[in-house]
Structure formats: C-alpha cells, structure tokens
Image: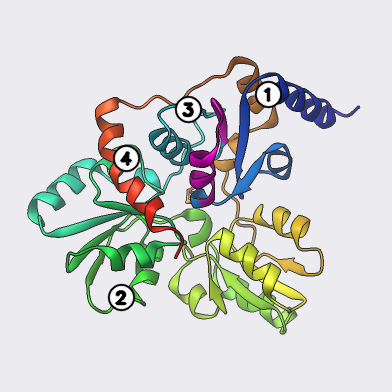
Amino acid sequence: MSADEDIRKNIKELKREKDVVIVAHNYQTGLIQDIGDYVGDSFGLAQKVNEMDVSNVVFCGVDFMAESAAILNPDKNVIHPEPESRCPMAAMVDMDELKSYKEKNPDTAIVSYVNTNVETKARSDICCTSSNAVKVVRSVDEEKVLFLPDKNLGRYIKRFIDDKEVEVWEGYCGTHDDITAADVKGLKDEHPDAEVVVHPECRPEVIDIADYAESTAGILNRAKESDVDEMIIGTEKEMGYRLRKEVKDKEFYFPGDPTCQNMKKITPEKVLRSLETLEPVVEIEDEVAERALKPLEKMVDLGRG
Ligand code: SF4
C-alpha cells in the first residue's frame, strides 16, 4: 500500500470512529479534496457546515474560512489542521486605517468580502462572497459603500452598481492578480473555440477578455452546462482537479501556473493528526465573534447571487 493510500485508509477509519466531517475548499490539493466529505467554495462550505448535524468539523482551507465556520457554528468544534494556512489578502486590512475611515465616514456601509479576518468582519455591516457580492452591495440602504479588501472584485462589482458610490480598498489576491491578459490571450490563440471563465478576483483587463466571471462554484456550474469542448479557466490551478474529476467531456486549460501556497499548507498528514487529536480548534474571543456573526449571517441569509 502506498503512503497516500495508507493515509486515506487511516483517515477513513478515524472519521468513522469519531463524529467528524471533513470539508475542503476547491483550491486544496487533489488528495485533500478526495478525503473531504464536501468540497466547495467558501459560500458553499459555510452553508454546508451550518446544515450539518455533527460535533467536529475539520476545515481544509485558509484561516478566514475556518474562522467564519466557527463563528457561524458556536456549537461545533471547528478544527483547522494548519493555523498557519493564512490568506495574505485577508491580512491587507489595517485595523487602525479601517477604524479611522469609519470615524470619518459614518454614513458609509462597510461591505467586506468573506476573505477578511475576524476583526475586519466585526467592524463591517455585511459580508459577501464572490458569488453574491453584487447582490450584497445592492442590498444595503446606504448610498456609499466601502468594499474591502479586494480591489479587483470591488472594481468588478462597480460594473453592475449605478445607484451607489462604491469605494474600493487596495488589497488583492496575488494568485489571481498574477494571471495576465497576455497568458489568457496566448491560450485563446491556441484554443480559439474555448470558452473563457475567470474568477472576479482577476484583474479588470483579464475579466474584459473573458466570456464569464464566476466564483469557483459558478465555474463548475458553467463547465457542466456549457456545450463547448474546451475551457480556459482563470483561477487557482487546483480547481482543475475538481473540474476534470466531475466534467469528463471537456479539456481545461489554466493560464500561467496560478497557485495559492497558503492553501497547500494543509497536508494529509496534518489532517490525520487533527483527526487523531481533534485539534487545533479555532478559538475566537466571544466579544469579537459576536460582532462578526451579524454580517456573516446577513451574507448567508442573502444566498448566492
Ligand atoms: S487564493 Fe487568494 S484569496 Fe484565496 S486564500 Fe489564496 S491568497 Fe487568499
């Protein structure tokens, strides 16, 4: 038996023995996706954890995802196998800067992408994911919105909002921001009939030459529905694993080598250790968790876009 098969077997046995469900983000490695009971985007996983009747959830994703699951589910033990698996974009919001912005702009709605840390969420009016960001911005009563932290997603939202002023924070996801229009065009030259679907965290000029901008769940749906034979996908490359597993009648091409190293810090060995010890559990200070809960609940209540 190979080392991978050995780990898979041990994980399967431990899951049976203990009251544990494993959820994995679409950007996790193929092996982690395979051992996950549910694989999805941040919105889908948040919804799934809410619905589950289970005591322990091993969350294979970056820090803000596990934190959000813990805040939304105080009755469950949310276990993050590698606390150092952190999203650098979430860390691009400086708390002092945000505090001072709020003081100067008391009538502005703070809409934060779910890719933020818990302190940012606690200072926000509502959260959103890439699949419901436009719907969320439309839902707020205020005429002015500060969207944070992703400038690319913020600029994308602005394309659809004409009755509000949307100010955008200067954060970005390096993985998506590194995807260039030249790389996409190069692939399009090689595969002229391919449909181009990119994540809205990509730069505006990449979105401009795409046929669709979608969350990872949207990309998967598009791949299942579209009748083309080839697709060019602008998002983290591990999404290709899920696409190729679930959509067998198409070829998928990725521009460049878009990799989120932070997601890859979760390894099967660390998942196995978490199953053995049921640790490390995500711990959030009650007062901050309470303040972050409302904007997260509003996001979930609004549903996908
Ligand atoms: S892909 Fe980008 S937004 Fe997602 S966790 Fe990695 S750095 Fe953060």
Which residue type carries mark 4? Answer: Leu
Q: Residue at point 57% right, 79% down?
A: 211
Asked if the stretch drawn in magenta spans residue 275, the answer is no
Specify the quadrant that holds the N terminus.
Answer: top right
Q: Quadrant of residue 166?
A: bottom left
Mark 2 → mark 4, Cα distance in angstroms: 26 Å
Q: Position of residue 288 (x, y in %)?
A: 27, 32
Residue 21 left/right relative to 297: right
Mark 1 → mark 2, Cα distance in angstroms: 46 Å
**Above or below 102: residue 274:** above
Q: Position of residue 283 (x, y in %)?
A: 40, 24
Q: Quadrant of residue 134?
A: bottom left
* Residue bearing mark 2: 161
Label 1 CB less than 8 angstroms from ligand 1:
no
Q: Secondary structure at mark 2?
A: loop
| Magenta-highlighted residues | 44-59
* Residue bearing mark 3: 76
Q: Between disc 3 and disc 1, whose residue precedes?
A: 3
The residue positioned farthest toward the right in the image shown: 1
Q: Secondary structure at mark 4?
A: helix
Which mark is on residue 293? 4
Mark 3 residue crowding within 10 angstroms, few (<14) / some (14–19) / many (20+) = some
